[in-house]
Amino acid sequence: MAEEMDSTKSASEETIELLKSIEEKSNNCHKMGSNLLMRLKDNELLTQNGNSFVELKNRVFLSYLMDLTYLVLKKVSGQRLEGSDVIQRLVEHRTVLERMRPIEHKLRYTFDKLIKTSTDGTVDPNDPLRFKPQLNSIVGTKDTEDMGDEEYNSQNDDMGSNDDMEESGDNGKKVRSDVYVPPKVAQMRFDVEEDRKAKALERAKKKALNSSIISELRREFDDRPEEVTHSVESHNKMNRFLKDKTVFEEEYMTRMSLTKKQRNEAKQMRIQSMTSTTAGLTHFGDITALDIDHNSDYQFSKQKKRTSSKNKKYKKGFKKFKK
């Protein structure tokens, strides 16, 4: 019995505290509502041409609060809730508010931007929506077009093209004519031969640095340890391939073409064999390109284009014999 009395006493104390908090909050809401009402009457708050979504949410939320207050009043006064429409209206308003949450989340950025603009009076320069194309910037008015023409004429005056301006009137003011005058552009020389000579000289210098005599000098005067390489296996493989190629050509009386990689390997093998024998004593390579400083002093040999026999035209006719 004592425990029931204690629980009833604690519940009554909690109920009294809740009622006090409800009274305090209701008084605060009453003051805030009266303040907003006075500001609306004095036209301090402009509600016209607002966001329809926010207006709908405010109306639904206000109806929800009114029905909820009415429900609390009926509970406190001890009235029965059976058969009352307030429960159905509360469920309907709560469902609408819950459905509006995803849409409000998507419009959060727009609402924050509008609030910040209205409070600060400035627009964020890093706003991503400012980077979208503006039609006003693309299609200007007549004043902006005239301004652009004047700026264009001033640029032409700086470049020395004053032919599109005519003097008119007693004051000697300059008026723009409708004739378009293109800007004067200085002619540039196009040196194709110089570029070809520079590239050819660069290739010749690279080839000279890889010649046998430069390699011998580098090996003799360089302080680094000498490198010794052995490529007997690759040479044997290439020798066998060349022998098989010769046998095939002699047997079938046809020429066998080599790939670019095979030609380079055969060339490297021939150069290494010449350096290792007495045949390479007189083979030094061309190193004259190393002494040339200017591109105009270099004379490169032009490769002749091969012309096929199909493109040759023969004149058909009878030979005339003298009597």
Image (cartoon, rainbow, N blue to C red):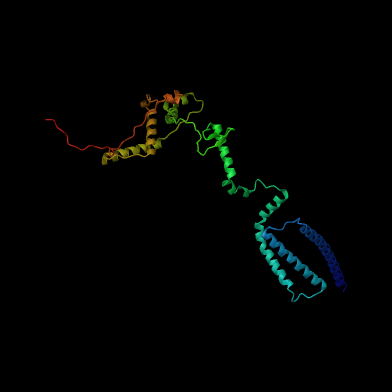
- Quick check: can you spot residue 134? no
- Quick check: can you spot residue 5? yes
Report the residue at 73% width, 73% height from top: 85
Quarter of the figure with residue 256: top left
Report the residue at 38% width, 30% height from top: 271
The N terminus - image quarter: bottom right
Report the residue at 59% width, 43% height from top: 144
Residue placed farthest to the bottom in the image? 83
Residue placed farthest to the front in the image? 170
Quarter of the figure with residue 215: top left
All told, the count of numbered labels is 0
Horizontal and vertical percent position of residue 315: 22, 37
Q: In this view, does 1 lie to the left or right of 192?
A: right
Q: Nearer the viewer, residue 100 or 212?
A: 100
Q: Is residue 98 left or right of residue 250?
A: right
Residue 10 against residue 264 in the figure, above or below: below
Horizontal and vertical percent position of residue 235: 38, 36
The C terminus - image quarter: top left
Residue placed farthest to the left in the image? 323
Horizontal and vertical percent position of residue 11: 84, 69
Q: Is residue 35 left or right of residue 134?
A: right
Report the residue at 70% width, 69% height from top: 91
Q: Which of 244 and 68 is in front in this view?
A: 68
Residue 4 against residue 107 in the figure, above or below: below
Quarter of the figure with residue 307: top left
Q: Nearer the viewer, residue 71 or 203?
A: 71
